[in-house]
Image (tube, rainbow, N blue to C red):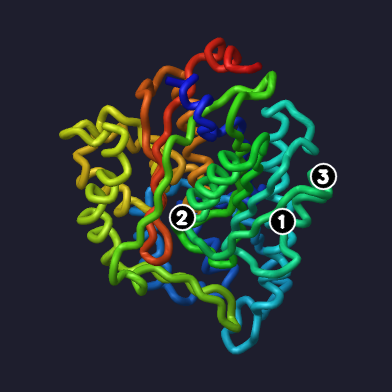
Amino acid sequence: MVATFLENQTAAMLAKGTANPGNIVPQDEYPDWYFRVTRSDHLTELKAKLKRIGEKSGVKKHHFLHSEEMIDSHPEFLDGSLPSLGARLDIAEEAVAKLGAAAAEKAIAEWGRPATDITHLILATTSCTSTPGPDLRVAALLGLGPTVRRTLLYFHGCSAGCGALRLAKDIAENSHGARVLVVCAEVMAMIKSLFGDGAGAVIVGAGPTIPGERPIFHMVSASQATLPGTEDAVWIKLSENGQRYYVSTGVPALVRDSTKGFLVNALEPLGLARGDAWNDLFWAVHPGGPAVLESYRSALGLQPEKLAVSRHVLSEYGNMLGATIIFVLDELRRRRHGGDEDSEWGVMLGLGPGLTVETMVLHAAGNQEEETSSSP
């Protein structure tokens, strides 16, 4: 089956890397930290509410770019009457490039090929917006060739990582010899109890592998669906005071009611949507939050361990928007190597503004001997 994928030019994830800022705030310290840095210690009832929300979030700690010193140096971040968008975007653009490059360096090192062999760069972020964008800075930091073809994806939110990987699959399968570097980086000015900052990178290629390459997951099929009438359920907007992010309380119910339908559409052509076989698959689900994960679980009748990877990533890093799914894929790979997951087929899922659902069917690569034997 793996040989068939390669003969049919099916793309594969070849290497991954992740990175986080060094500023870590444990969840149990987060309410005190947040109200101190925002000069809001007098709002005791709100602090108590934030503490309760944090206890239910499933997040143990946060990695933040924003430190207390940084916030102190920008009083406009705390005064809603002052415009702060320009300063926020300037900080985010530089940080997105540096953090994204740090994750990409790890992926390139694992890949084992020169950075100049990268033919395409896709960078996805919801943290900034400019042109030239952070993709150009990432290319320079990594020493990519001057002919690398760059694509920017802005403001796709939680589904950005899945959407970027879908695009990478299309490019790799339709450009002979392409090696696509996907970088998703988020350093959000919205410091909330569910979120955190981080970056992930994946190298994608199709066709016969270059000597030394070891496929991780074959990207068998990809699809995108927008749930009708949900345009206002999740949205992200820029304003003079920064970024506004809205998620309707009805999203978990929408996920629960629609999940099975769009998964059947994605899996049925491959003969993988038979009966109640959902637990025969592995699951790489973007952990938008505990309620969304529970909606997936209940809609499909999944055993709790099937979403353990997503819950673990949420616990250790919070929701890093588009970058999160790469952390999930990396943790899933680690557990497969450890023997904790042995399903051959799986599903990657991401949910973003729209309400947009990104779905990709994955096939786990075999052992190292099988992978390297496909090299010419």
Q: Nearer the viewer, residue 141 or 293?
A: 141
Q: Position of residue 33 (x, y in %)?
A: 55, 61
Q: Is residue 285 above or below residue 352?
A: above
Q: Position of residue 360 (x, y in %)?
A: 41, 42
Q: Quadrant of the N terminus?
A: top left
- The answer to whether residue 48 is visible is no
Q: Amino acid at mark 2?
A: Ser
Q: Residue furthest bottom?
A: 81
Q: Earlier in the sequence, mark 2 or mark 1?
A: 1
Task: State left or right for residue 169 relative to residue 73.
Answer: left
The residue shown at (72%, 30%) is: 109
Tell me the residue that label 1 is attached to: 135
The residue shown at (45%, 46%) is: 60
Q: Quadrant of the C terminus?
A: top right
Task: State left or right for residue 331 relative to residue 186.
Answer: left
Q: How many marks?
A: 3
Q: Is residue 191 above or below residue 275?
A: below
Tell me the residue that label 3 is attached to: 145
Tell me the residue that label 2 is attached to: 159
Q: CA distance from mark 3 to mark 1?
A: 13 Å
